[in-house]
Image (cartoon, rainbow, N blue to C red):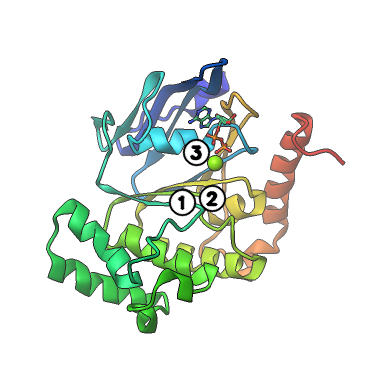
C-alpha cells in the first residue's frame, strides 16, 4: 500500500523509480537487496532516502546512475529510462573517490575529459566552485594534503562542475567528524537554494535527513522497500532556530519511533 502511495505521477517528476528491484546473484545464494521500490523526485526537489545499513540504499543509487543493472522495474530520469551509465548527473560517494595522483583541479577536470566538454569553460567553473568552497589555494595540491572535509568538498566541486540538473549523494558526510558534517550540511543547503538541482540524498542519519529534505523516503530493513514517505514542512534555510524548533524534533521523533517499531533502534 505504502509503495503505491509513494508513486507520484506528476509530470514534473525528474527522477522516477517504478517497482525497482535488485537481486544479487552470488555463488552461494541469491540475495534480495531491494524489493519493489517506487517513488519519484520532482524537478528541483531535495529528497532523502533514509534507512538502516544494508537496506539497499547504495544499490538503489547505483541502479539510478545506470552503474548497476536492475532485476525488475525501471528508473527514469528526465523522461528517459536509465539503461546504461547515465552521464548528465553528478554523484558524490561517502569515500571521496578522488584520484590520489591527480591534483584537486585535475580531479575536477576529469569531468571535462570524460564528457569531452570545453576545458576552458569547465576550468573557469572549477575555479568558481573552488573559491565558493574555500579551496582555491588548494587547487594544485594533492588529495593527501587536504583534510577529510576538504577532500569531500573537492568531490562535491567535481560533481557540480558540469552543472548537472540531477545530483546523487551516497552518505557523502558519513566519514566526517560531527562539526565538519554540520558545516557541510549548511553549505550543501546553500548551494541547493542557489541552484535548485534535483537531489537524491542517501543517508542513515535521521536528523541529517530532516534538516536537508523536502521529503524523506523511509526504507524498511533489507530487503529494502518504501516504508513511509514524509514531507518536511520546515522553512528554509534550515537555521539553528529551525533545527531546534519543536516541529523539527517531532519529525525526528516520528522517524525514530518508526525505526523502533521495526526493531532498528532499541532502547
Ligand atoms: P546500504 O547502502 O543500504 O547499506 P547496499 O545497497 O550496499 O545497502 O546493500 C544491500 C544488500 O546487498 C546488503 O545485504 C549487501 O551485502 C548486498 N550487496 C551489495 N552489493 C552487493 C554485491 N555486489 N554482491 C552481492 N551482494 C551485494
Ligand atoms: Mg550504502
Marks 3 and 1, Cα distance to the nearest angstrom? 9 Å
User: Label 2 crowding class (10 Å Cα cut-off): few <14, some 14-19, many 20+?
Assistant: some
Give the position of the C terminus as an image quadrant.
top right
Q: Which residue is mark 2?
A: 171
- Looking at marks 3 and 1 on the same chain, the residue that comes earlier in the sequence is marked by 3
Q: Residue furthest bottom?
A: 137
Location of residue 176 in the rendering, given as x and y in whole percent from the top left corner? 59, 63
Residue drawn at x 38%, y 77% is 141
Asked where in the image residue 75 lies, by quadrant, the reply is top left
State yes or no: discs 1 and 2 in contact (Cβ < 8 Å): yes
- Residue in front for this viewpoint, 249 or 160: 160
Q: Label 2 CB, ligand 2: below 8 Å?
A: yes
- Badge 2 marks a residue whose secondary structure is loop
Location of residue 248 in the rendering, given as x and y in whole percent from the top left corner? 67, 55
- Badge 1 marks a residue whose secondary structure is loop
Q: Which residue is mark 1?
A: 93
Location of residue 91 in the rendering, given as x and y in whole percent from the top left corner? 38, 50
Residue drawn at x 21%, y 71% is 123
Amino acid at each position: 500500500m505504502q509503495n503505491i502511495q509513494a508513486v507520484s505521477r506528476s509530470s514534473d517528476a525528474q527522477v522516477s523509480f517504478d517497482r525497482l528491484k535488485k537481486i544479487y546473484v552470488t555463488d552461494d545464494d541469491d540475495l534480495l537487496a531491494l524489493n519493489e521500490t517506487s517513488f519519484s523526485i520532482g524537478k528541483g526537489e531535495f529528497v532523502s532516502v533514509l534507512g538502516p545499513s544494508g537496506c539497499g540504499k547504495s544499490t538503489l543509487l547505483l541502479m539510478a546512475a545506470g552503474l548497476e543493472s536492475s532485476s525488475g522495474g525501471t528508473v527514469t530520469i528526465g523522461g528517459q529510462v536509465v539503461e546504461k551509465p547515465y552521464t548528465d548527473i553528478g554523484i558524490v560517494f561517502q569515500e571521496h573517490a578522488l584520484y590520489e595522483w591527480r591534483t584537486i583541479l585535475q580531479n575536477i577536470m576529469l569531468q571535462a575529459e570524460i564528457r569531452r566538454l570545453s576545458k576552458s569553460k569547465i576550468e573557469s567553473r572549477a575555479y568558481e566552485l573552488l573559491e565558493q568552497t574555500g579551496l582555491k589555494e588548494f587547487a594544485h595540491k594533492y588529495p593527501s594534503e587536504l583534510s577529510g572535509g576538504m577532500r569531500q568538498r573537492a568531490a562535491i566541486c567535481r560533481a557540480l562542475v558540469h552543472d548537472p540538473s540531477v545530483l546523487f549523494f551516497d552518505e557523502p558526510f558519513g566519514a566526517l567528524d560531527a562539526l565538519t558534517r554540520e558545516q557541510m550540511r549548511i553549505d550543501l543547503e546553500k548551494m541547493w537554494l542557489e541552484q535548485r538541482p534535483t537531489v537524491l540524498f542517501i543517508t542513515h542519519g535521521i536528523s541529517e535527513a530532516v534538516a536537508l529534505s523536502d521529503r524523506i523516503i523511509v526504507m524498511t530493513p533489507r530487503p529494502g522497500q518504501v516504508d513511509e514517505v514524509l514531507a518536511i514542512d520546515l522553512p528554509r534555510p534550515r537555521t539553528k532556530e529551525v533545527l531546534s524548533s519543536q516541529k523539527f524534533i517531532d519529525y525526528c521523533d516520528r522517524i525514530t519511533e518508526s525505526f523502533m517499531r521495526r526493531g532498528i533502534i532499541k532502547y
